[in-house]
Amino acid sequence: MLWLSLIVSFAWSLAGLTPPQLPDGTAPSAKLPFGKDRAVFRETFDRASVGVGGTWGWKSGAYAGDCTDNPRDFKLDHLTPDALTVADGALLISARPAPDGRWTTGLITTGDTCGSGGSGEQVRTGDFLLAHLRLPEANTGAWPALWTWRDGHNEIDVFEWHADRPGTAEFVNHTRSGDGTYSSDAIRAGGWLYVGARFGADNVVWYVGATPTRLEVAYQDHTGVGADFAAYPVLSLSVNNGRYHRAPPAQQPFDLAVDSLTIYRPTAPSGGR
């Protein structure tokens, strides 16, 4: 109803807050897990802002091999900025086989980028991180992930997906403890979905859903990230080397797309959320 929409918009304005940006045709809902938060960082990928001076870096200190390769984590990745393209309001990360057996692929992160750029924006205790992704159209090998990292630790796996387990998402709290999985028909090769997590001091809550108003609680760890957590968001498309998940066919490239990534922050201290 128009009058209700106007009242909601006016209330946000009086409070001096930024209302959550929802897809066209989506109504605000009291059940939104980030409904009372303000957006402190929002990327809608209208342009490529990657590299020194840009929003995103394309290397990561989490990659032990010169910040571009990470074979010890069972990945065939070789990061390159050429794997990152923006078109029609979405970032496309492309994984392609290379002659030496590795796969050229991409990653974006705001910090700990080994001098490759980034705004330095961080996810902090109490924040809600949300992204809208299109999973690769692949049956094996593809390993997209949304996670956090800073200075060798503070890793929270907000979302991991392996193409040989197409209906299942994986979640891990590497900072304290806790890991879980979630299965749904909405999680499928080539499908779009929202993935996110609330970084509570005593409990991290993971969400998966088709729209921001239909986010399902996928897992809770009841351990949290502590009171002073801060880390950089990372979005990556990795390639499995076959150790724990099947490697990809040699000549079948695949892509990950993302059209929004947002950090929401509570307007008041979150305590043990």
Image (cartoon, grey):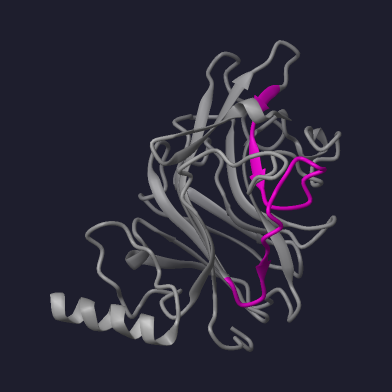
Looking at the rendered image, the quarter that the N terminus falls into is: bottom left
Describe residue 239's horizontal placement relative to residue 42 as left or right. Answer: right
Q: Is residue 1 visible?
A: no
Report x, y in % for residue 182.
Answer: 49, 58
Report x, y in % for residue 82.
Answer: 63, 25
The span shown in magenta is 103-127
User: Most prominent secondary structure in the magenta stretch?
Assistant: loop
Q: Residue at x 86, y 34 (%)?
A: 66
- Closest to the observer: 181 or 52? 52
Q: Residue at x 82, y 43 (%)?
A: 114
Q: Residue at x 59, y 72 (%)?
A: 127
Describe residue 187's horizontal placement relative to residue 242 as left or right. Answer: left
**Magenta includes 246?**
no
Looking at the rendered image, the quarter that the C terminus falls into is: bottom right
Q: Residue at x 67, y 80 (%)?
A: 201
Q: Residue furthest top?
A: 99
